[in-house]
Amino acid sequence: MALRDEQCREDRLRNRIAELPAEQRRVFHGRMARRLKDPDSYAVLNYLFIAGLHHFYLRRWFRGAVNLAVFLVGLACLLTGQWRWGLGLLLLITLIELPALFCSQRIVLRYNNDLAESQLAETGHSQN
């Protein structure tokens, strides 16, 4: 989904949230405030190239663990003299994760929109 599509989805969600009764809206915002993610934090974690940290930030445990494992194996290969394997693994993980660096706003907006939809469903206000 493109950034513009996610922004339209966010607008629709905001309208649905505005229709909630005051008490439900207060509870909704209280829950969301603790769980919303920031695109800049995600981008910084990805930019550090310690692969996987940005996935952990969005609670994508498996993908974060796989990326971190590949990164650590690549680093270990570099340190033990297997520099071709190490460099290859680090380059591979960098190429795989590079698009996420440039799409951080869309990725985090999708995460936050999904979170808002799940919170609305919990309050009994799923999509119309």
Image (spheres, rainbow, N blue to C red):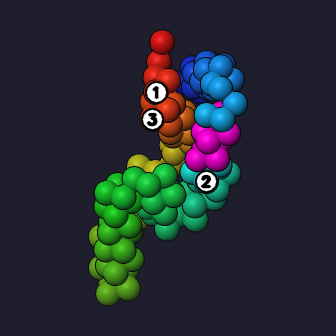
Read off the residue under disc 2.
34
| Residue range corresponding to the magenta coloring | 25-32
Q: Is residue 111 visible?
A: yes
Q: Are the residues at dot 1 and dot 3 in contact (C-beta closer than 8 Å)?
A: yes
Q: Earlier in the sequence, mark 1 or mark 2?
A: 2
- The answer to whether residue 42 is above or below residue 123 is below
**Residue 119 at x, y = what percent?**
50, 37
Residue density around tag 1, few if under 14, some if 14–19, many if 20 or more, within 10 Å: few
- The answer to whether residue 53 is above or below residue 37 is below
Amino acid type of the residue tagged 3 in the rendering: Glu
**Residue most extreme to the bottom:** 80
Amino acid type of the residue tagged 1 in the rendering: Gly
Question: SS at mark 1?
Answer: loop
Read off the residue under disc 3.
122
The verdict on residue 31 being magenta is yes
Amino acid type of the residue tagged 2 in the rendering: Arg
**Residue 107 at x, y = what percent?**
53, 39
**Residue 19 at x, y = what percent?**
65, 19
Looking at the image, residue 55 sits to the left or right of residue 104; the answer is left
